[in-house]
Amino acid sequence: MKTIRSKMMMLSIIIWIIMAFIWISMSIFNQRTVEKYNEILQRYLMMNQASQQSRQALTTLNDYRMSPTEESLRLYVSANNQLQLTKAQMNWLRNPSNDMVLDNFQHMMESQSEAMNLAVRFQKDNDDENGIKQFDEATNISTYISEMTLELISGEQNTYDAFYRKIIDRSNDIKKMGFWTLALVSLLLLLFSYRFVNSVTQPILKLTQSARELSRGNFQNPIVVNNNDDMSFLARTLDNMRLNIGNLFDEIQSKAQLEYDLHKHKLMLKESELKSLQSQINPHFLFNTLNMLSKEAYLAGADKTSELISSVAGMLRYNLRRMDSRVTLRDEIEVLEEYLTIQQARFGSRVNIVRDIDEDALDIEVPILILQPIVENAFIYAIEPSEDGGTLTLRVKNEGNHVLVQVEDNGQGMESEQVARMLSHVDSAGYKGHSTGIGIRNVLDRLQLFYGVQDIIAVESTPGEGTCLTLALPRRPKS
């Protein structure tokens, strides 16, 4: 393994050297190409700049002729000086192929400058005829300069055509060099991989055969690998494990009986716990029993008793849900009807229940058990204390982005202090309802958490006239 590691390191170094050589060669080639391209670009820019300076100088001269002020004269002088500077800088473009054309180009720039200066002098002398003549002469020369600029650029393209072709040939050579380099590196890797895999797979096959023998329970044959590398260390470690497993095998057999006895004892304990649980009546068992009693009462002809038992069973089944469940307002109304059925049977003609429910408003999502605690509160504090009973009104209607749920009674009513105490945590701590044990404050807290808003409940109560509790339920609870 150590030899393989050294060979692998050597191969990695060779590959790194080859790749570094290719990278350096390509970097040098690219740098030289970029520099040459930059030089050519600068030549084109300078030729184009000369043509632009010629037109700019002519434009400033025309501005001066139209408006002969000190500022317009200053701008013309600056543009003419820049034209002369560009003429001098164009000597950098000179080569054997454009020597004559470049001389003519510079002479025209000089001629344009002289014609413009004469036009300025005639302008100052108020000699309009000669001034116009010289301006026209400068204009013609500027046109010739633009045409000769195109001729110079065309000559440059012809001059550097061989350079472009050379760049293309070099690019093709680099592609070929990359292909052969890749082929060489691939061949070296293939040869190394063959030797590497062959030197690794043989010890691995031997270790695999030894591991198979161990899996069959044969701990007698020693494991030996003669390689002087990590595989031999792995073989010695596996052989030590073979010896340890053999020593532990007897201990495992001696502990098997003890574990069996312990497992048997646990099974007996579980059976005892199961019998203890079976002796308890849970809500689900009670729910099933009520359903059975409802059916028996119905078969016996006691329809009223069957209906009441069915209502209790429905309330119990609904109340067994988790308190963080989401239901629809329709579900809340349905379970509330079960509760009202029981209360109607209990109070008889003493209670009058009025319903004003908009069916289109019942699909909104709400927390579970928000209506029954409110109605229970009305029965406990408004209906039950009155000898004549009372009237309970349930309203559900759409209003804008909210669904309004109102529970109204015509009981004794409350003072503002009593309303505040009803909505406080202190009052809800000792609240005991008919079926839920949930106070108004608990309902308020869950609604605020569910919808993410605070202003969700309103209580209007007048002593001696009754109480109206209103829930404003947003249509879309916050996520």
Image (cartoon, helix red, strand yellow):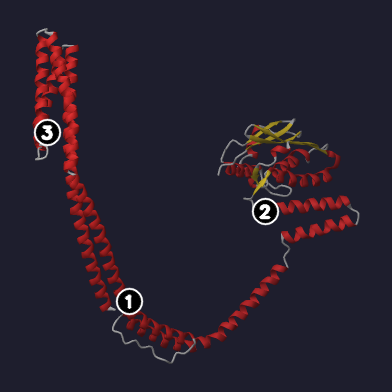
30 vs 108, left or right, is right
Quadrant of the drawing holding the N terminus: bottom left
Residue most extreme to the top: 126
Q: Is residue 61 above or below residue 329?
A: above
Residue 274: percent from left, percent from top: 68, 71
Q: Are marks 1 and 2 in contact (CB under 8 Å)?
A: no
**Amino acid type indicated by mark 1:** Tyr
| Residue carrying label 3 | 101
**Amino acid type indicated by mark 2:** Arg
Residue most extreme to the bottom: 220
Q: Is residue 62 above or below residue 380?
A: above
Q: Residues within 10 Å of mark 1 (few under 14, many from 20)?
A: few
172 vs 117, left or right, is right
> Looking at the image, which is closer to me, 103 or 346?
103
Residue 333: percent from left, percent from top: 73, 43
Label 2's element?
loop
Residue 349 location, quadrant: top right
> Looking at the image, which is closer to me, 390 or 56?
56
Quadrant of the drawing holding the C terminus: top right
For image coordinates 72% across by 68% down, the residue present is: 278
Q: Residues within 10 Å of mark 3 (few under 14, many from 20)?
A: some
Compute the Cα span from label 1 to label 2. 67 Å
468 vs 2, left or right, is right
| Residue carrying label 2 | 321
For image coordinates 19% across by 20% down, the residue present is: 59
Residue 141: percent from left, percent from top: 15, 23
Please tell me the numbered disc located at residue 194. Answer: 1
Q: Nearer the viewer, mark 2 or mark 3?
A: 3
